[in-house]
Amino acid sequence: EVQLVESGGALVQPGGSLRLSCAASGFSFDTYWMSWVRQAPGKGLEWVANINLDGSEKRYVDSVKGRFTISRDNAKKSLYMQMNSLRAEDTAVYYCARMDLWLSPFDYWGQGTLVTVSS
Amino acid sequence: DIVMTQSPDSLAVSLGERATINCKSSQSVLYTPNNKNYLAWYQQKPGQPPKLLIYWASTRESGVPDRFSGSGSGTDFTLTISSLQAEDVAVYYCQQYWGTYTFGPGTKLEIK
C-alpha cells in the first residue's frame, strides 16, 4: 500500500525557518517525481515545488523561489522541504504528493502537516 | 501561468440526480502531438487530502466509480457525476499539469 506521511509542521514566527519531511513506503520511491502542494485554511490548492528522480531538477512556484528548497533522500525514501524566511501567507497544510513523471497528475497524497506562521 | 476557473462555486443536487461541474483554462492544455489534454480532477472531502479521480481529462483513476466521468478538450472541461451518492459530498478541483501545475478554485458539492 502506498503511504506518504508528512511531519515537521509547527507554529513559527515570521522570518523563521522550518523543515518538513515526507516518509514514503509501499512503492519504489526513486522511480517517481515528488511534489509539495499546500492549502491555506479554508482555501484552495497551490502547487509549491517538485523534484525529479535523482534530485537534479527542481521547480518552484514563484512565491517561494529563493526561500524554499525541495530535496530528497532516495536511500531513506524521504522527501524534504526546507522553508526559510517564512511569511504569514505561507500558513497552510502542506501535502507531499507523488507523480509518475514531470507532467503528470498527483496520484497519491499524504495526510498533510500544518505550518502556521504567526507572532 | 495558466489560470483555471470553475463553475459553479457551489452546487446542490438531489440524491440519484446528475451533477455537472465545469472547468476552463486560460490557454489550451491540449498537446496535439500526442492528442492528450493535461487536465485532472480531484475530490477532497473534509479533513482529507485530495484524491485523484480523472486524468488526461477523461481517464478514470483505478478504483473510481464509473458514475464519475470527465470530458472536454483544449480549454473547456466537465466533470459529471451521473447519479449522486451521499458519499460524493466534497469539494472538486480541476488541475492543469501542462508546464506547471495550477488548480481551479474548487466547486463545493452538496446534497439538495
Image (cartoon, helix red, strand yellow):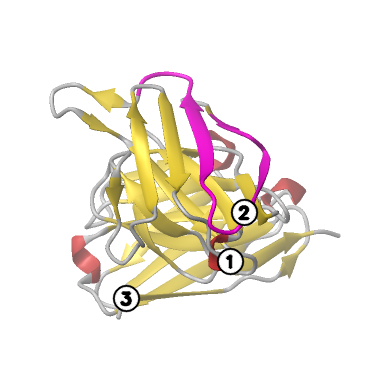
Q: Which residue is mark 3?
A: A2
Quadrant including the C terminus of chain A: bottom right
Magenta region:
B5-28
The residue where tag 2 is placed is A39
On-image quarter of the N terminus of chain A: bottom left
In the image, farthest residue toward the right: A119
Measured as percent of width and height from the top left, residue A28 is found at 20, 72
Q: Which residue is mark 1?
A: B86
Q: Amino acid at mark 3?
A: Val
Give the residue displayed 59% in from the left and 37% down from the top.
A63
Q: Which quadrant would residue A94 be assigned to in this image?
A: bottom right
Give x and y (percent) for residue A77: 30, 75
Q: Is residue A3 above or below residue A105?
A: below
Residue type, mark 2 in image: Gln
What's the residue type where badge 1 is placed?
A: Ala
Q: Which class describes the residues within 10 Å of circle 1: few (<14), some (14-19), or many (20+)?
A: few
